[in-house]
Image (cartoon, coloured by chain):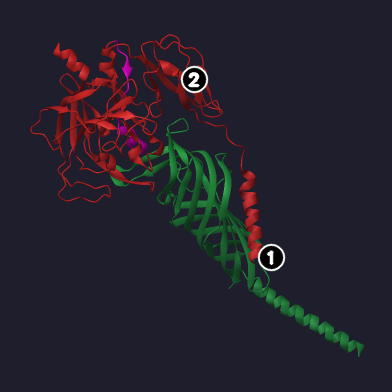
Amino acid sequence: MKRIWIKYIVTCLLLMSVSLSINAQEFRQHWEKKVFAAYNLGGTSPFPIPAEIRKINYWKPGFGGTLAFHLTRWLDPNWGVTTGLAIDLKGMKVEADVKYLYTSLVVGEGDHSGKFTGAFSGKDQTNVRNGYLVLPLMAAWRPNDQWSVRLGGYVAFQNDAKFEGVASDGYIRNGGPTGEKINVESATYDFAEEVRSFDAGIMASGDWFFTKKIAATAQLSWGLVPIFPSDFEGLSYKMYNIYLSLGIAYRL
Amino acid sequence: MKTLRGIITTLWICIGLTSCIQDEPLCPEAEIESFTLPSELLFSDPVINQGQNTIQVLLNKKADLTALAPEVTVNEFSTVSPASGETVDFTNPVTYRVTAQDGIHTRDYKVQMIVMDDEDVYTSLMKNFEFSYWEENSSFHYATPVQKTNDGTTYSIFSTSNQGVALYQQFPVPEQYPTYAIEHNDGFAAKMITKEGPGSILGIQYIPIVAGSLYTGKMNLLNALKDPLTATQMGQPFNQIPVRFTGYYKYKAGTGDYIGSDGNPKPGVKDSCAIYAVFYRIDENLQVLDGTNVHNHPNIILQAMLPDRSSTDGEELHAFDIEFKRLNDEVIDFSKHEYKLAVVFSSSFWGDRYEGTPGSELIVDDAKIITEEDEVVSSY
């Protein structure tokens, strides 16, 4: 009886291991396709924060996220290469108290537009939502079937920009900090047309498959190209897209 | 999920943003906020022009120009040299330098004192406007006419719309601004031209047109974005009774549409020029007239307004000779009250409200204020 019991167990274990190895074979296929949807948290932000920014009054991620398709070519059981395509909406709303912030704003329209240049002290509310088409290229590593991590870079092409704001409750000094003081109750600005059409940076992501098909996923993309071109004078500091995407991945 | 998001959000803000807030930057601002002398020395209150970085003081006859000790206040953290209360020789203009807390930014104010000791000085500064001398602003390159006494001292009593325009449009040469000098009769005359404006300014103001304008007084941009009419502060101290306002002018109204302040054409409206002067009493409620009240403030006692403000014939300048008319019966008493006189020229009468026809041109030269004292002198 005992032997039969043991035989039964051994058979089960064998069967299990065979079925597992068959599953593993399926999982560990050379090509892996994955789609994921994630919510973007982060900021289009100077880094480091310049001294002119005195206080962040609030920050909201706003409506923004990423929809991605990732294709991984596994070269061996642990290592692979990932590429893909993503639609990425990077946005935030932030209000900061600023002091002596140098700015040069294009005002007016067409032939008669000009520049308003000065050092602003007061509140600055910025609303950003930039849409990108993202091409990642990352090295992939998986220690086991539940986990995989990726590290690499991305290039992105901006196809829809929104970068606007309100400067309020302060004053600007015409031309610079030693210029004439002009009160600013509430002034709007729009830098959308200035946003660079290209972005590139570092990308890192991690997947945790809690079922065979579905994973919790986190992805950090850290832009290394300032979002405004070098001749842009609206802000005295460089800003970068620094976003963390949190979402769900589905293995196809 | 919501909690998770909250935690991550908080972490992200803390790590990514707040922890990186740096130390407060040293203040780069440098400004003289007040400049005073004992009132018995003053002909009129010192005028600080923050746009031109000048301080001008008209002194009574008894003031000793070689040894004055003005009290000066500057913005917090900055320092000024010469120091407040220091005795200084003002025979020539003196530069007061304000150094900001950061030690990098400095701002120089030219302080000029003029003793109103005789009628010649008074006339050349306050009554005769030849537009012969212009000074170019070093930062923005617009020009402003200045007055010159016989001994060669220059004094700014005029402001132009250029200073406001330069806020949002900067040009490399004075002639591209709406008010500038043109050659006339071996000297210079003032030309003003109405131009198309920039449109929307940062969502605060809509500026469809900008008119050339020239007036005695100063432009104070502090509240210019919100209330542009308060920026044009018109009037200089004046202690004679004006009788006539004379000079030469030529006006050509623009041929296109008259543009209203909303940017839409006003059919049937013809542009007209502004040439007028007002004499008013100042008191605790009224230090200076501005665009909101220069036509109708009850303190205006005398007004000289060009009767026909439409285009002139031909290419020559035409003489104008306008009598000051009384707007009320108030007794003028220089021993009890202080008075100011504002002289205003503009290529569009309602230009300060951003109304007019682009292309309207006004040229003025050799304007004079004739006072009762002049009439008495000339009758001898």
Q: Which residue is drawn at 15% across and 14% down?
A: B378
Q: Which of B361 and B271 is in front in this view?
A: B271
State which chain is coloured red: B
Foreground of the two, B241 or B342: B241
Residue A190 rendering spot, x and y as whole percentages:
42, 50
At 41% from the left and 36% from the top, the residue drawn is B222
Q: How far apart are marks 2 and 1 (CA)?
A: 74 Å
**Is A148 included in the stretch rendered in magenta?**
no
Answer left or right for B327 relative to B72.
left
What residue type is disc 1 on?
Trp
Q: Where is mark 2, residue-wise?
A: B71
Residue at left offset 24%, top offset 48% = B260
- Chain A color in figure: green
> What span is in magenta?
B151-169
Residue toward you, B170 or B240:
B240
Most distant residue in the left direction? B314
> Which label number is shown at residue A147?
1
Residues at badges 2 and 1 in contact (C-beta under 8 Å)?
no
Q: Residue at x 44, y 31 (%)?
A: A179
In the displayed structure, would residue B115 be above or below residue A10?
A: above
Q: Chain for mark 2?
A: B
Q: Relative to residue B365, is residue A187 depicted above or below?
A: below
Percent from the top left, x then y, of residue B194? 23, 38
Which of the image's four quarters has the C terminus of chain B? top left
Q: How crowded is mark 1: few (under 14 residues within 10 Å), some or many (20 or more)?
A: some
Disc 1 secondary structure class: strand
Residue B162 lies in the magenta-colored region: yes
Q: State how many labels appear.
A: 2
